[in-house]
Image (cartoon, grey):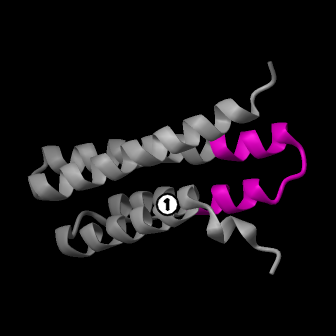
Amino acid sequence: MAFDFRNLEVYKKAKEFHSACLTVLETSKPANFVKDQLGRASMSVVLNIAEGSGKFSNADRRNFYVIARASVFECVAVIDILNDQKKITLQEFESLLNNADELSRMLYKMISNLSTK
């Protein structure tokens, strides 16, 4: 099958992160705009990894991985606000933050490997 991105560890971790974000959103019951923003941003991580893997040039691939990493940062901002508002537990906050950090580091490495030197 031609969808090799499904075997990438970063893709699998992005899907897990998205799922964890959705679970937290279901239990924390934030405002609809917050729920929409985190849902869309965490989905963007997954989709940009998939889309980037289908590009032929390193520059194009790199661009999508940069967008995916920026979406991770967006998720962290929302998670940080949910934590400040006491909408999520400290354990949920730390778990999501650790997952986001791991994703960010993986994407950074991928971006660095595709950078022109």
Of residues 64 and 85, the one drawn nearer to the viewer in this rendering: 64
**Which region shows up in magenta?**
46-66
Seen in the picture, residue 96 relative to 47 is either above or below; the reply is above
Is residue 11 highlighted in magenta? no
Of residues 85 and 80, the one drawn nearer to the viewer in this rendering: 80
Percent from the top left, x then y, of residue 75? 40, 49
Instruction: Place residue 19 in its image quadrant.
Output: bottom left
Seen in the picture, residue 45 relative to 7 is either above or below; the reply is above
**Residue 80 can be seen, yes or no:** yes
Which element type, helix, strand or loop, lies under badge 1? helix
Could you tell me which residue is drawn at 64 percent across and 40 percent down? 110
Could you tell me which residue is drawn at 52 percent across and 66 percent down? 12
**Residue 87 can be seen, yes or no:** no
Is residue 47 highlighted in magenta? yes
Of residues 86 and 3, the one drawn nearer to the viewer in this rendering: 3
Instruction: Place residue 29 in its image quadrant.
Output: bottom left
Find disc 1 in the rendering and name its residue. 14
Could you tell me which residue is drawn at 55 percent across and 56 percent down? 10
Percent from the top left, x then y, of residue 1? 80, 81
